[in-house]
Image (cartoon, rainbow, N blue to C red):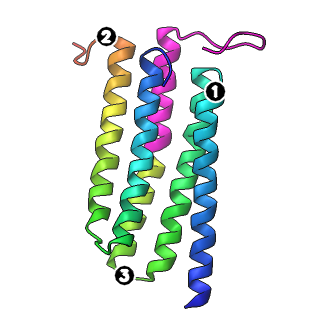
Amino acid sequence: MGPGTFNRIVAANVIGTKAIVLLIIAGYIIERPQFIDIALMYAAIAFIGTIIIAKYAERGELCSR
Amino acid sequence: MLAIEVISTVFLAAGAFFMITGTAGLLKFPDFYTRLHATGKADTLGQILIIVGCMIYEGFSFITIKLLLVSAFYLLVGPTGTHALIRAAYVTGVPVWKKGDNRM
Protein backbone atom coordinates (compact mmCIF):
# COMPACT_ATOMS: atom_id res chain seq x y z
CA MET A 1 0.00 0.00 0.00
CA GLY A 2 1.65 3.10 -1.22
CA PRO A 3 5.18 4.42 -1.04
CA GLY A 4 6.77 5.68 2.10
CA THR A 5 6.60 4.94 5.80
CA PHE A 6 3.33 6.59 6.70
CA ASN A 7 1.21 4.89 4.07
CA ARG A 8 2.37 1.57 5.42
CA ILE A 9 1.49 2.60 8.97
CA VAL A 10 -1.99 3.54 7.72
CA ALA A 11 -2.29 0.14 6.07
CA ALA A 12 -1.32 -1.60 9.31
CA ASN A 13 -3.82 0.56 11.22
CA VAL A 14 -6.65 -0.32 8.85
CA ILE A 15 -5.76 -4.01 8.96
CA GLY A 16 -5.84 -3.82 12.75
CA THR A 17 -9.31 -2.29 12.72
CA LYS A 18 -10.63 -4.95 10.37
CA ALA A 19 -8.98 -7.67 12.45
CA ILE A 20 -10.80 -6.49 15.58
CA VAL A 21 -14.17 -6.63 13.85
CA LEU A 22 -13.39 -9.99 12.24
CA LEU A 23 -12.36 -11.45 15.59
CA ILE A 24 -15.64 -10.38 17.17
CA ILE A 25 -17.72 -11.71 14.25
CA ALA A 26 -15.75 -14.99 14.20
CA GLY A 27 -16.30 -15.34 17.92
CA TYR A 28 -20.01 -15.10 17.30
CA ILE A 29 -19.93 -17.55 14.41
CA ILE A 30 -18.10 -20.34 16.20
CA GLU A 31 -19.70 -19.40 19.55
CA ARG A 32 -16.62 -18.62 21.55
CA PRO A 33 -16.96 -15.37 23.51
CA GLN A 34 -13.29 -15.46 24.53
CA PHE A 35 -12.49 -13.93 21.16
CA ILE A 36 -13.71 -10.58 22.47
CA ASP A 37 -10.83 -10.48 24.95
CA ILE A 38 -8.42 -11.22 22.12
CA ALA A 39 -10.00 -8.39 20.12
CA LEU A 40 -9.53 -6.00 23.03
CA MET A 41 -5.87 -6.93 23.40
CA TYR A 42 -5.38 -6.64 19.65
CA ALA A 43 -6.84 -3.13 19.73
CA ALA A 44 -4.46 -2.16 22.53
CA ILE A 45 -1.40 -3.59 20.78
CA ALA A 46 -2.31 -1.99 17.43
CA PHE A 47 -2.77 1.38 19.12
CA ILE A 48 0.56 1.17 20.92
CA GLY A 49 2.31 0.15 17.70
CA THR A 50 0.78 3.04 15.76
CA ILE A 51 1.69 5.59 18.42
CA ILE A 52 5.25 4.35 18.81
CA ILE A 53 5.99 4.18 15.08
CA ALA A 54 4.50 7.67 14.58
CA LYS A 55 6.64 9.06 17.41
CA TYR A 56 9.74 7.38 16.06
CA ALA A 57 9.12 8.68 12.54
CA GLU A 58 8.50 12.17 13.87
CA ARG A 59 11.49 12.57 16.19
CA GLY A 60 13.96 9.92 15.08
CA GLU A 61 14.30 8.58 18.60
CA LEU A 62 12.12 7.01 21.21
CA CYS A 63 13.67 8.19 24.48
CA SER A 64 13.93 11.97 24.59
CA ARG A 65 16.41 13.10 27.16
CA MET B 1 -36.76 -12.30 18.94
CA LEU B 2 -37.33 -11.49 15.30
CA ALA B 3 -37.31 -7.72 15.91
CA ILE B 4 -33.96 -7.99 17.73
CA GLU B 5 -32.47 -9.93 14.83
CA VAL B 6 -33.75 -7.41 12.28
CA ILE B 7 -32.37 -4.45 14.24
CA SER B 8 -28.97 -6.07 14.76
CA THR B 9 -28.82 -7.01 11.05
CA VAL B 10 -29.50 -3.40 10.12
CA PHE B 11 -26.68 -2.25 12.39
CA LEU B 12 -24.27 -4.86 11.01
CA ALA B 13 -25.12 -3.91 7.42
CA ALA B 14 -24.62 -0.22 8.15
CA GLY B 15 -21.26 -0.95 9.76
CA ALA B 16 -20.15 -3.10 6.84
CA PHE B 17 -21.19 -0.34 4.43
CA PHE B 18 -19.13 2.26 6.29
CA MET B 19 -16.09 -0.02 6.48
CA ILE B 20 -16.27 -0.79 2.75
CA THR B 21 -16.59 2.92 2.02
CA GLY B 22 -13.56 3.74 4.15
CA THR B 23 -11.47 1.06 2.50
CA ALA B 24 -12.48 2.24 -0.96
CA GLY B 25 -11.38 5.74 0.05
CA LEU B 26 -8.07 4.35 1.30
CA LEU B 27 -7.48 2.65 -2.03
CA LYS B 28 -8.61 5.48 -4.30
CA PHE B 29 -7.60 8.78 -2.70
CA PRO B 30 -4.43 10.40 -4.03
CA ASP B 31 -2.70 11.55 -0.85
CA PHE B 32 -1.67 10.44 2.61
CA TYR B 33 -3.84 12.99 4.38
CA THR B 34 -6.90 12.27 2.28
CA ARG B 35 -6.43 8.55 2.87
CA LEU B 36 -6.42 9.10 6.61
CA HIS B 37 -9.41 11.40 6.19
CA ALA B 38 -11.27 8.50 4.61
CA THR B 39 -10.23 5.74 6.98
CA GLY B 40 -9.92 7.58 10.28
CA LYS B 41 -13.61 8.33 10.62
CA ALA B 42 -15.36 5.73 8.50
CA ASP B 43 -13.54 2.81 10.12
CA THR B 44 -14.31 4.04 13.63
CA LEU B 45 -17.98 4.51 12.81
CA GLY B 46 -18.24 1.17 11.04
CA GLN B 47 -16.59 -0.73 13.84
CA ILE B 48 -18.77 0.88 16.48
CA LEU B 49 -21.91 0.14 14.45
CA ILE B 50 -20.92 -3.51 14.06
CA ILE B 51 -20.18 -3.85 17.78
CA VAL B 52 -23.51 -2.19 18.65
CA GLY B 53 -25.23 -4.70 16.36
CA CYS B 54 -23.51 -7.55 18.23
CA MET B 55 -24.56 -6.00 21.55
CA ILE B 56 -28.20 -5.81 20.47
CA TYR B 57 -28.05 -9.42 19.28
CA GLU B 58 -26.49 -10.54 22.53
CA GLY B 59 -28.94 -8.99 24.94
CA PHE B 60 -27.79 -7.94 28.38
CA SER B 61 -25.00 -10.08 29.77
CA PHE B 62 -21.34 -9.90 30.69
CA ILE B 63 -20.34 -10.20 27.02
CA THR B 64 -22.28 -7.03 26.29
CA ILE B 65 -20.20 -5.12 28.80
CA LYS B 66 -17.00 -6.46 27.23
CA LEU B 67 -18.21 -5.44 23.77
CA LEU B 68 -19.02 -1.99 25.12
CA LEU B 69 -15.50 -1.87 26.54
CA VAL B 70 -13.98 -2.74 23.15
CA SER B 71 -16.16 -0.12 21.45
CA ALA B 72 -15.34 2.62 23.96
CA PHE B 73 -11.65 1.78 23.82
CA TYR B 74 -11.55 2.03 20.06
CA LEU B 75 -13.59 5.23 20.13
CA LEU B 76 -10.87 6.60 22.40
CA VAL B 77 -7.75 5.33 20.64
CA GLY B 78 -8.70 5.37 16.96
CA PRO B 79 -8.90 9.15 16.46
CA THR B 80 -5.92 9.58 18.82
CA GLY B 81 -3.74 7.34 16.65
CA THR B 82 -4.96 9.06 13.49
CA HIS B 83 -4.14 12.47 14.92
CA ALA B 84 -0.69 11.41 16.08
CA LEU B 85 0.03 9.89 12.67
CA ILE B 86 -1.06 13.00 10.76
CA ARG B 87 0.92 15.25 13.09
CA ALA B 88 4.04 13.12 12.62
CA ALA B 89 3.62 13.18 8.84
CA TYR B 90 3.07 16.95 8.75
CA VAL B 91 6.08 17.68 10.95
CA THR B 92 8.24 15.32 8.90
CA GLY B 93 7.19 17.03 5.69
CA VAL B 94 5.08 14.61 3.72
CA PRO B 95 3.95 16.56 0.62
CA VAL B 96 0.36 17.72 0.40
CA TRP B 97 -1.64 16.88 -2.71
CA LYS B 98 -3.08 19.78 -4.68
CA LYS B 99 -5.61 19.70 -7.47
CA GLY B 100 -3.97 18.68 -10.71
CA ASP B 101 -1.07 16.80 -9.18
CA ASN B 102 -0.38 13.17 -9.79
CA ARG B 103 -1.30 10.44 -7.35
CA MET B 104 1.25 10.17 -4.54
Q: Residue B21 carries which label?
A: none
Marked residue nearer the N-terminal end (1 or 3) = 1
Q: Is mark 1 on a helix, strand or loop?
A: helix
**Which residue corresponds to mark 1?**
B34
Provide the chain ID for the residue under circle 3: B
The amino acid beneath tag 3 is Ser
Residue sitting at x 59%, y 29%? B35
Q: Do the residues labelled 3 and 2 touch (CB within 8 Å)?
A: no
Provide the chain ID for the residue under circle 1: B
Provide the chain ID for the residue under circle 2: A
Q: Residue B61 carries which label?
A: 3
Please indicate whether residue A37 sits to the left or right of residue B48 in the image.
left
In front of the other: A61 or B94: B94
B72 versus B22 height, above or below:
below
Alpha-carbon distance for marks 1 and 2? 25 Å
Tags 3 and 2 on a common chain: no
Answer few, some or many: residues within 10 Å of disc 1's Cα (few below 14, many 20 plus, some between 14 and 19). Answer: some
Q: Quadrant of the N terminus of chain B?
A: bottom right
The amino acid beneath tag 1 is Thr
Give coordinates of residue A59: x percent, y percent.
35, 12
B59 versus B78 height, above or below:
below
For marks 1 and 2, give the one nearer the viewer.
1
Q: Which mark is residue A60?
A: 2
